[in-house]
Image: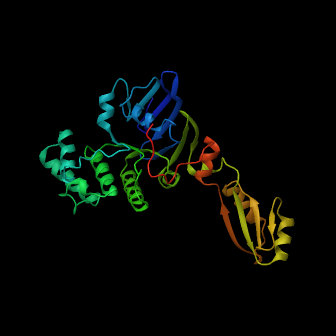
Amino acid sequence: MTTRANAIEVAELRKSYGDHEVIAGVDLTVPAGTVYALLGPNGAGKTTMVRILSTLLPAGAGEVRVAGYDVRREADLVRASIGVTGQFSAVDELLTGRENLRLMADLGHLGRLRAETMVGRLLERFSLVDAADRRAVTYSGGMKRRLDLAMTLVARPRLIFLDEPTTGLDPRGRRDLWGIVRELVADGITVFLTTQYLEEADQLADRIGVLDRGRLVAEGTAAELKRLVPGGHIELQVADSERVAELACQLPGASPNPEALTLTLPHDGSLTALRRLLDGIHDDGGVTGLAVHTPDLDDVFLALTGRPTTKGLPKEVPV
């Protein structure tokens, strides 16, 4: 089922605990070398999905292939092809950063010379050289998260699962990690990301899936998902109130505001609709500015799940 072009393919995936169905018939495909973000509220099934894809939890039903291998029959080959960074750090705080990386190299059976080379490269890549020989207990939250991700990369996986990777990080730490993810994808690594931070998915993901109560309720690019929600509009800045009245007559559906010298029109976010609007406006200086407003992923999340996001909470509960 999986081709070289796809890192993950899932068909009719199901998982239940007793009478409670946690994953309810999910289908998804993740092309190699991309970032796929799985969004969902607490209890949606995101972490369960990651555990199944990474062979940590058996599926109840369905077909799952990761890195070209069947997760049931070829679990060892799947594990050899992936890296997993969970919600909670796997760093041993009694060891130094360098020792943590060496430990992962030993577990991966890297030769001594290769291990030293890899450890040095990762310390430099993740800006941990100056702290390499300090115990990890002295590291900040952002440094521990970078070390955790560096440990995942020791075995050079081509597919990485990041389960709520920026939970608990401050804005700067979150953006630092985003930069690292972008570098990984530029190197050809596939990233499967679960998150409740809508901005994170918007910034990083090539495609986004919205999971709610175990079902994939929507999937697409950030722009495609935003177009699912009404409320997009274009606001025109106009030179004077007389011109506002003229444009209101010319443009069907326009809502004039003579006091603010603006005119608002519904907009579906498409380039075609924007071009049509611009073609209908004479370039005579009457329109002095234009702004396109589209619903953000918070609006999408609320519309699809019926619940607001928990963006900004200090801690999120694993599923």
The percent coordinates of residue 207 (x first, y second) are 52, 46
- Quarter of the picture containing the C terminus is top left
Quadrant in which residue 82 is drawn: top left
Residue 109 location, x and y as percent?
17, 39
Indicate left or right for 194 with 160 as reference: right
Which corner quadrant holds the N terminus?
top left
Residue at the far left: name it. Answer: 112
Q: Is residue 209 above or below residue 68?
A: below
* Relative side of 204 to 55, left or right: right
User: Which residue is found at the position 82% from the left and 76% from the top?
Assistant: 241
> What x and y, as percent, mark residue 210?
55, 41
Q: Which residue sits at x=31%, y=34%? A: 79
Q: How many marks?
A: 0
Quadrant in the picture for residue 4: top left
Give above or below for 96 relative to 38: below
Q: Position of residue 35 (x, y in %)?
A: 45, 47
Residue drawn at x 44%, y 48% as measured from the top left: 315
Task: Report the residue at 43% width, 37% height from top.
Answer: 47
Camera-side residue: 20 or 299? 20
Scheme of colours in the image: rainbow
Tell me: residue 158, above or below residue 61: below
Q: Nearer the viewer, residue 158 or 106?
A: 106
Q: Which of 90 and 185 is in front in this view?
A: 90
